[in-house]
Amino acid sequence: MASDVYFFDCDKTLYEYDFRKRLPALARLTGVSEYHLARTWWVGGHETAADEGEYRSSDEYLAAWEVVTGVPLTLEQWQEARSAAMTPIPGAIAALRRAATFGTVSLLSNNPIPFRDSLPILAPEVSDILNGNDLTSAVLGAEKPERRIYTRALGVYGVAAENAILFDDSAANVEGARAAGMHAWQFTEKNGVYDVDGLNAAIDAFANRQR
């Protein structure tokens, strides 16, 4: 059985994420309007379907994109637009590195296959720390806060729920993890300041808990 597992969300936990920067970048790269892309792909539910694992490869995702939106998109363009929306949170990344000294660290993020395939490009600051432990909802076939994403993630590492913790900005995701028997802690931000001290304290509390 694996040692303790420290699961980290990505967007708004390890990286700031702003969709308002991603959509304009996609519009510029594809030559169609933001409205068209939002209406066809996002409002049409296709990104949600991708997050849930409907498209099992980056090629499938990009092929579906072209059918739905009517414009082609390369993986490099997808990466460029996604990167435009992401900014590292240095203190959180340092906390991830620190957690890796106590046990296994893993991503647990609601994202599609192209995100996982592109992680070394999108998130080089954390890719080496994770050492291939890059679980996304598309791989697990369920999204947080569904119970099955947590049980499947635990199964990947062969760890009991009580020996795993999730760090996530979403209160619903945190409650979902707790309902599955895991420890969990909500990462918060106020006026642009992230609670990195609280994050490190939560890591310490879990690492030093009574067994």
Image: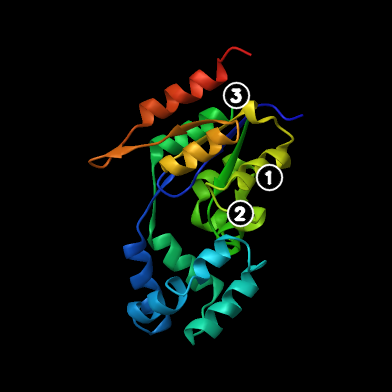
User: In this rendering, is residue 192 above or below 45?
Assistant: above
Task: Tell me which numbered mark, 1 or 2, is placed earlier along the sequence.
Answer: 2
Provide residue 51's location: percent of width, then percent of height.
56, 61
Report the quarter where the N terminus lies. Answer: top right
Q: Which residue lies furthest to the bottom in this view?
A: 70
**Does dot 1 land on a helix, a strand or a loop?**
helix
Residue 202: assigned label: none
For discs 2 and 3, the disc positioned in front in the rendered view: 2
How far apart marks 3 and 1 lie (CA) works out to 22 Å
Label 1 CA crowd tier, 10 Å (few <14, some 14–19, many 20+): some
Residue 152: assigned label: 1
Residue 102: assigned label: 3
Q: Do the residues labelled 1 and 2 touch (CB within 8 Å)?
A: yes
Which residue is at a point 42% across and 29% down the rendered structure image?
A: 199
Quarter-of-image position of residue 177: top right
Which amino acid, mark 3?
A: Phe
Which amino acid, mark 1?
A: Arg
Label 2 CA crowd tier, 10 Å (few <14, some 14–19, many 20+): many
Which amino acid, mark 2?
A: Ala
**Does dot 3 land on a helix, a strand or a loop?**
loop
Query: Which residue is more in the foreground, 150 or 136?
Result: 150
**Does dot 2 land on a helix, a strand or a loop?**
loop
- Colouring mode (rainbow / by chain / secondary structure / one colour): rainbow
Report the quarter where the C terminus lies. Answer: top right
Q: Residue furthest front?
A: 179
For discs 3 and 1, the disc positioned in front in the rendered view: 1
Task: Tell me which numbered mark, 2 or 3, is placed earlier along the sequence.
Answer: 3
Q: Do the residues labelled 3 and 1 touch (CB within 8 Å)?
A: no
Provide residue 65's location: percent of width, then percent of height.
53, 78
